[in-house]
Amino acid sequence: MSVVPIDFRALHHAEPSHVHGPHEPQPALSAMRLGASLYVPTTRPDLVAIASGRKLPELRSVIFCTEDAVHERDLKQALDHLAALLPELEPGPLLRFIRPRNPAVLRLLLRMDGIERVQGFALPKLDPHTLGDWLRAWDDCHGHYVLPILETAEAFDRRRMELLRDRLEDSGLRDRVLGLRIGGNDLLNLLGIRRARGATIYDTPLRGVIADLVCIFHPAGYRLSAPVFDYLDAPKTLAREVEADLQHGLVGKTAIHPAQIPVIEKGYRVSREDYDMASAVLAADAAAVFRTHDAFCEPATHRRWAAGVLERARVFGVTAISDESR
């Protein structure tokens, strides 16, 4: 069976980012390229070094936060930092997003000089009740993407999430939604729970919530990203959680510390077996049903999985056989 060739020479940042004018849309972007997204409070003194890519050059995407990571009394300072930073941003591979505190802050951000130099916004606590508020603040003249964050009590209600999906379809934002982010800690907080050390998010009641969200949004073509992992000294548990994230179809994961980035992105590397099977499924001469690696393959039902595997391989690479045997 033939294998689709992959160029692995430029896996880290496959496509450059560019600065665009007010009427020039940004190029199509895949949620897969977000990788491990690091949340950074906009009050940090090293904001410029991070945003420029000089610090943490391995970072694929960053979300500058003006919400939970910034105290109310420090909001003005955070916005002043962004106002000074944005006009100085240069094109580069780092994907930059801002999490506005609320729709009023989004409206202020959209008026700042240089706002076209970021790729978009992570919209916190988006649900059927708040969608209208965000839409009234929205201005699409720069072609920004949005990353709605599902983190309110409505996320536990399947009917409310189906309503949100339908309203997003009718909102005019459909093509600008890069992916939906699952706010795991906010959802656990609503339950009065914090995961125990050594536990993954799938060892909590959120396992069923995540599965429901996948079943609601994935068939409609939306991507979902994985919740944050709280502990910095449990890389093996983090690795297990990343494996479970992928099994649930989640791409991209919030990181709270740079030390988590290599653990997350190592987990995103594709096994040689999956790469071979995905290539075989998408091959032009693939049979309707065939066996490879002692697995049943049927292009009619495995095509979407195979396309996702090869996209992940282009971004994160393929695990060496010697690594798989360890």
Image (cartoon, grey):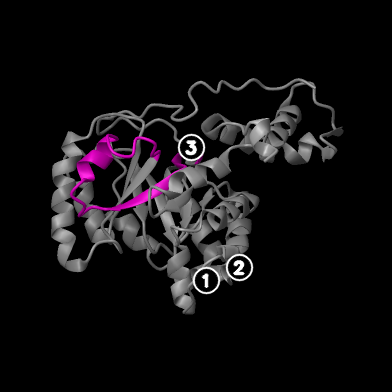
Query: Which residue is the site of mark 2?
Result: 203
Res 304 quadrant in image: top right
The x and y percentages for residue 199 are 57, 66
Q: Residues within 10 Å of mark 2 (few under 14, many from 20)?
A: few
| Earlier sequence position, callout 2 versus callout 1 | 1
SS of the residue under disc 1: loop
Res 88 quadrant in image: top left
**Side of 233 relative to 114 (left or right):** right
Foreground: disc 3 or disc 2: 2
Evaluate whether residue 162 shows in this view.
yes
Question: Mark 3 to mark 2: distance in Å?
Answer: 29 Å
Q: Which residues are magenta?
A: 32-60
The x and y percentages for residue 167 are 48, 58
Evaluate whether residue 177 shows in this view.
no
Question: Mark 3 to mark 1: distance in Å?
Answer: 33 Å
Compared with residue 69, is residue 242 higher up or lower down, i.e. above or below?
above
Question: Mark 2 to mark 1: distance in Å?
Answer: 9 Å
SS of the residue under disc 3: loop
The x and y percentages for residue 292 are 83, 33
Res 162 quadrant in image: bottom right
**Side of 120 relative to 30 (left or right):** left
The x and y percentages for residue 67 are 28, 61
Residue shown at 64% from the left, 20% from the top: 5
Foreground: disc 2 or disc 1: 1
Task: Give yes or no for contact between labels 2 and 1 (Cβ–Cβ under 8 Å).
Answer: yes
Residue 196 numbered tag:
1
Residue 30 numbered tag:
3
Residue shown at 30% from the left, 64% from the top: 68
Nearer to the camera, 85 or 111: 85
Nearer to the camera, 134 or 35: 35
